[in-house]
Image: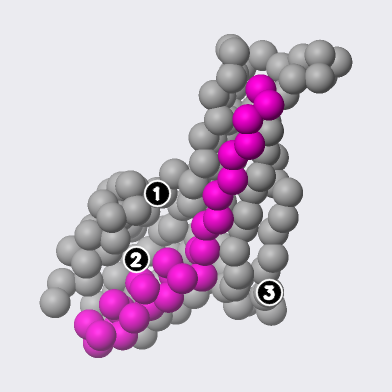
Amino acid sequence: MNIIDEIQKIARDTGGTLSEKKGIYTLKIPVAERKAFLSRKKLTYVARFRMDDAKKELRFTEMLKESGFGLMSGDSGLSSGFGFKKESCRTGFGQPREGTIEEQSTLFGKQFSYTFDFGKLRGQIEKLAEAGGHAFKYQVTSMGL
């Protein structure tokens, strides 16, 4: 079993991409996107990891990245409809976040919602690493991956 090939399959199955640069792999999965008149906002799950075959470990970090552009008017009553309504997580110092992020929004009177469980995805990658004989090391920051 090739760990990278299996993570590539996870990326494809979730609509994401996996890329590599200088030994650091980046997994990007779009979580939500809102398009409105002259504006767009996007939420992306980003995980970075490095395989250290000498130490037999996979060092891993993750984050949620929000990006957007466009024109917004604060007094018209219309917004892009993008915003976090609920986030539940549990964490300790140096430990990965557990839980889900949920978003509900109203865009031009239409309701949208999604749930993304980043803990479940991280767990899949951890199981793949361990099945391939690598220890899974979660890092709070990507510095020194």
The mark nearer the N terminus, 2 or 1, is 1
What range is drawn magenta here?
108-134
Do residues under tags 2 and 1 come within 8 Å of each other at their CB atoms? no
Do residues under tags 3 and 2 come within 8 Å of each other at their CB atoms? no
Foreground disc of the pair 2, 1: 1
Quarter of the image for the N terminus: give it.
bottom left
Residue pointed to by mark 1: 28
| Mark 3 Cα-neighbour bin, 10 Å: few <14, some 14–19, many ≥20 | few
Determine the CA span between mark 3 and mark 2: 25 Å
Q: Is residue 110 above or below residue 86?
A: above
Q: Position of residue 109 (x, y in %)?
A: 68, 26
Residue pointed to by mark 3: 90
The mark nearer the N terminus, 3 or 1, is 1
**Does the magenta segment cover residue 119?**
yes
Q: Amino acid at mark 3?
A: Arg
Q: Position of residue 47 (x, y in %)?
A: 44, 58
Secondary structure type for disc 2: strand
Determine the CA span between mark 3 and mark 1: 23 Å
Secondary structure type for disc 3: strand
Answer whether residue 57 is visible to the viewer in this image: no
Q: Is residue 61 above or below residue 92?
A: above
**Residue, x 66% and y 45% (percent of image)?**
104
Do residues under tags 3 and 1 come within 8 Å of each other at their CB atoms? no
Q: Is residue 40 above or below residue 48?
A: above
Residue pointed to by mark 2: 50
Q: Amino acid at mark 2?
A: Arg
| Mark 2 Cα-neighbour bin, 10 Å: few <14, some 14–19, many ≥20 | many
**In this view, which residue lies farthest toward the right?**
75
Which one is in front, 104 or 100? 104
Secondary structure type for disc 1: strand
**Residue, x 69% and y 79% (percent of image)?**
92
